[in-house]
């Protein structure tokens, strides 16, 4: 099928619009100007995870943050129980519109928790 010039000029890519709206609605970025949001939109992308898949693990080096488009995550930490064994303890669950991993933007310290996709498929902007 032939793509006409105006198809490219006058139609906004659905994925680009979705990312722009997520960034604009995230209170971390609410003070950014439109050119700054446009720049940020160009350096992030959408990524999908399967149920149970790790996004990152406690102790790994953090390289970015995530905004949830759809799905749910569990954030958990390792705790040593009274039997001196380590168990994974879920501390919170996040859903669409929530963000996580933002401390990696401010610090070079390792991740302080483990994050896994929970339930159905997960889509995030990273």
Image (cartoon, rainbow, N blue to C red):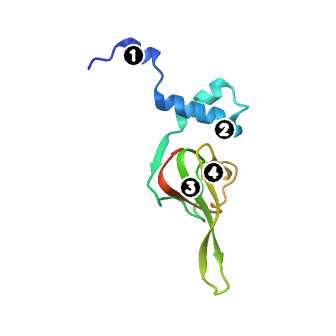
Q: Which mark is residue 48?
A: none
State the residue in front, 81 or 126.
Answer: 81
Q: Which residue is mark 2?
A: 26
Q: Give the distance between the C-alpha atoms of the residues marked 4 and 1, in whole angstroms.
A: 36 Å
Q: Which residue is mark 1?
A: 7
State which tag comes first along the sequence, 4 or 1. 1
State which tag comes first along the sequence, 2 or 1. 1
- Is the Cβ of the residue at disc 4 closer than 8 Å to that at disc 3? yes
Q: Give the distance between the C-alpha atoms of the residues marked 3 and 1, in whole angstroms.
A: 37 Å
How many marks the image carries: the answer is: 4
Q: Position of residue 2 (x, y in %)?
A: 28, 17
Which is in the foreground here, disc 3 or disc 2? 3
Mark 1: few, some, or many residues within 10 Å (few <14, many ≥20)?
Answer: few
Q: Position of residue 62 (x, y in %)?
A: 60, 55
Q: Give the distance between the C-alpha atoms of the residues marked 4 and 2, in whole angstroms.
A: 11 Å
Mark 3: few, some, or many residues within 10 Å (few <14, many ≥20)?
Answer: many
Q: Give the distance between the C-alpha atoms of the residues marked 4 and 3, in whole angstroms.
A: 10 Å
Q: Could you say whether the residue bearing mark 1 is in a helix, strand or loop?
A: helix
Q: Which residue is mark 3?
A: 73
Residue 84 higher or lower than 16, as above or below = below
> Measuring 41% from the left and 18% from the top, which residue is drawn there?
8
Q: Could you say whether the residue bearing mark 4 is in a helix, strand or loop?
A: strand
Q: Which residue is mark 4?
A: 100
- Is the Cβ of the residue at disc 4 closer than 8 Å to that at disc 1? no
User: In the figure, residue 1 lies in which quadrant?
Assistant: top left
> Measuring 57% from the left and 62% from the top, which residue is drawn there?
60
- Is the Cβ of the residue at disc 4 closer than 8 Å to that at disc 2? no
Q: Is residue 31 left or right of residue 78?
A: right
């Amino acid at each position: 099928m032939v793509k006409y010039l105006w198809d490219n000029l006058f139609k906004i890519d659905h994925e680009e619009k979705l990312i722009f709206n997520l960034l604009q609605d995230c209170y971390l970025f609410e003070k950014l100007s439109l050119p700054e949001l446009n720049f940020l939109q160009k350096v992030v992308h959408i990524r999908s995870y399967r149920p149970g898949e790790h996004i990152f693990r406690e102790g790994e080096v953090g390289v970015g943050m995530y905004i949830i488009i759809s799905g749910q995550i569990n954030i958990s930490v390792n705790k040593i129980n009274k039997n001196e064994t380590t168990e994974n303890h879920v501390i919170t669950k996040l859903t669409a519109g929530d963000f996580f991993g933002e401390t990696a933007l401010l610090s070079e310290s390792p991740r302080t928790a483990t994050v896994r996709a929970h339930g159905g498929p997960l889509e995030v902007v990273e």
